[in-house]
Amino acid sequence: MANAVALDEKTGRKFYLDDPDDLKPGEDVTFILNLHGGGSVGAWQRAYFPAVDYRDKYRLVIATPSAATKEPSRRWVGEADDAHLHNIVEQVTAKYGKDHIKAVWLAGHSQGGMTSNRLLSEDAFFQNRVDGWLSLSGGRLGPAPRAEGFSVPMPPGQTFNPPRFPPSGSPTGDFSHIFTTGEHEIASLPETSPWAEKYGAGARARRPDIVDTVGGQIHDTTRESYSTKGWGLKPGPGTAQVWVYPGAKDGRVIADVVRLNKGHTEGLEPNVTEELIKLMVSAPGGKAKVL
């Protein structure tokens, strides 16, 4: 991958910023703010959800930052990180022009997904700008209980003491929502969606499975010797099941994607990644243009 590093002009913090190689002045783009999970960094997230590989085909601008807080593990907490994310959105909007940003999406893995939920619940800046949220094993708007015993694996003789995060509210704004998860990290996927009901969508409809003959680009190498199926093993080929809720008000996209025989940390396979991006770019946008 190209090392596309940008600078937050207000704080000096670096982040990845990728756009189409042949982008023309005044061309419309879809903007994705891609947030890593707890204990991770932007470089890992950029490979875990490799939207960068499809930036040319689907005219994407992707910003992938790293959280500042490092103890007990790197995670999105505090006003400094929120301000950094605000700065990135403002900087990207200024660079490409608000009239040319078709839609703004939050994509978040694990604690990055929890952070997306918090921002859409509590932060008017994001509520007014975000057209969609892609949750990458980062929580669903509606129930999707964890598999029994799911946890961060620890070396023999050690136990996991999860960090405490302030509870998030429930998002109340209008946006599309796509949830994807590994089969081994949830107990089951419900057949209904409160978010789909909010927009008057119909019963979920099964789409053809997505089949990948190659694996993703990355996994959790730090726990490789004692990981679990729920947490995630090495990348490999896979199949994913896709459900969409048709007929949602104003054309919003609500969908669930389950990657079979996968856990929490295997990087997304190429065909699954592309299908998620297709869903994203098919959804309505336009919030950035009215600010």
Image (tube, helix red, strand yellow):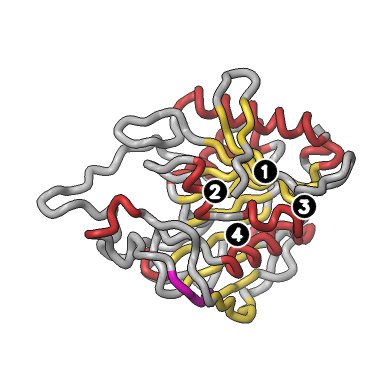
For the residues marked 3 and 2, what is the alpha-carbon distance in whole angstroms?
A: 17 Å
Provide the residue span drawn in magenta: 236-240
Mark 1–mark 2 contact, CB under 8 Å?
Answer: yes
Q: CA distance from mark 4 to mark 1?
A: 22 Å
Q: Which residue is mark 1?
A: 18
Query: Circle 3 sits on which residue?
Result: 59
Indicate yes or no whether the magenta region holds residue 93: no
Three-letter amino acid code at the position of disc 1: Asp
Q: Earlier in the sequence, mark 3 or mark 1?
A: 1
86 and 49: which is toward the camera: 49
Q: Is residue 239 magenta?
A: yes
Q: CA distance from mark 4 to mark 2?
A: 18 Å
Residue tagged 2: 46
Query: Left or right: 151 with respect to 255?
Result: left
Sooner in the amino-acid sequence: mark 1 or mark 2: 1
Measure the C-alpha gap from mark 3 to mark 4: 19 Å
